[in-house]
Amino acid sequence: MKDLKNQNNPMENIDDWEDNLKERYPDPDATVKEKEEFRNYVDSERLETVKEFYRINHLYQTYDFVCSKEEEFLKFDKKELSLWEAVDFLNTLIDDSDPDIDLDQLQHLLQTSEAIRADGHPDWFILTGFIHDLGKVLCLFGEPQWAVVGDTFPVGCKFSDKIVYPEFFSENPDTTNPKYNTKFGVYSPNCGLDNVKMSWGHDEYLYQIMKNYLPDPALYMIRYHSFYSQHRENDYAHLMNEKDVEMFEWVKLFNPYDLYTKAPVKPDVKKLMPYYKELVSKYLPEKLNF
């Protein structure tokens, strides 16, 4: 198999993909702003950056690639960290290029979780908002961004034309492989998403770390929050079972908190930490294997 770690990284920072999501799926409840008030997410340079990201992502995210990444990372032998050490580790991914906001990863996570908390949701939901992006530590293990972030989708069956930039799958070898290029591919009707391999990234990685600690709705939010071709486009219902359908109501509930809570006001980390330390200790062990 090719050494893919040396492929050029098409995004300068990890927030490019998230900014593109906001442009593709704008907040329906947002107050209309003057044009000069918000960042120009549709300038040609940014669009070309995101397009190149998805060109590489769609080229290399094959069934065999996902299997190889599961073999590499699901041994959880990279680091043993507490949740707080993992957050500190993630904070080395501070985005210095975003002109609208100067927040490290901890502050972004707190904005998400505090919005969930303010709406009176259960504490496990708040915790999910707080930890949902921790799988991005994959970048710090040498993984390129196209194998860490981006919209996720099933591999092992025909790629949906509802996935962002579907034309780039034309170069993916699974597209011409009769084992994988039919509607169901290696799967059976309504087999359930737990039996379906998703494209590799931070969602699946964190799910695998957390699957023994959190309730099912939280695990679905973590595992499928980037699966836009289903929770926004409903194009993979033929693989879902009744439990998936039920749990995706939670995924859809979580999505606005993930996308639309970014704001310039920094959370008071010192004030909030006692609550979150107690919350983390309620659900998670002292150390986690990454």
Image (tube, rainbow, N blue to C red):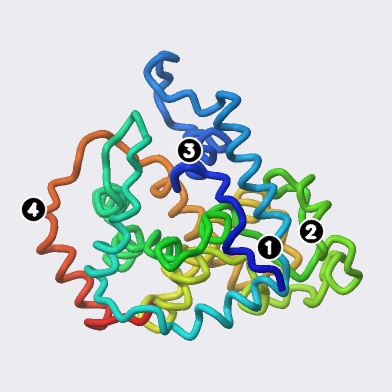
Residue for point 27% across, 65% down:
123
The number of callouts visible is 4
Q: Nearer the viewer, mark 1 or mark 3?
A: 1
| Residue at mark 4 to residue at mark 1: CA–CA distance | 42 Å
The alpha-carbon separation of the residues under discs 1 and 2 comes to: 8 Å
Residue at the spot of label 1: 61
Residue at numbered disc 3: 19
What's the distance in space between the residues labelled 1 and 3, CA to CA?
A: 22 Å
Could you tell which of marks 4 and 2 lies nearer the N-terminus? 2
Looking at the rendered image, the disc whose residue lies closer to the viewer, 2 or 3, is 2
Q: Position of residue 169 (x, y in %)?
A: 78, 53
If you read the primary sequence from the N terminus, does the residue marked by circle 2 or circle 3 appear first? Answer: 3
Q: Which residue is mark 2?
A: 172
Residue labelled with disc 4: 271
The front one of 218 and 57 is: 57
Amino acid type, label 2: Asn
Kind of residue sitting beneath label 1: Gln
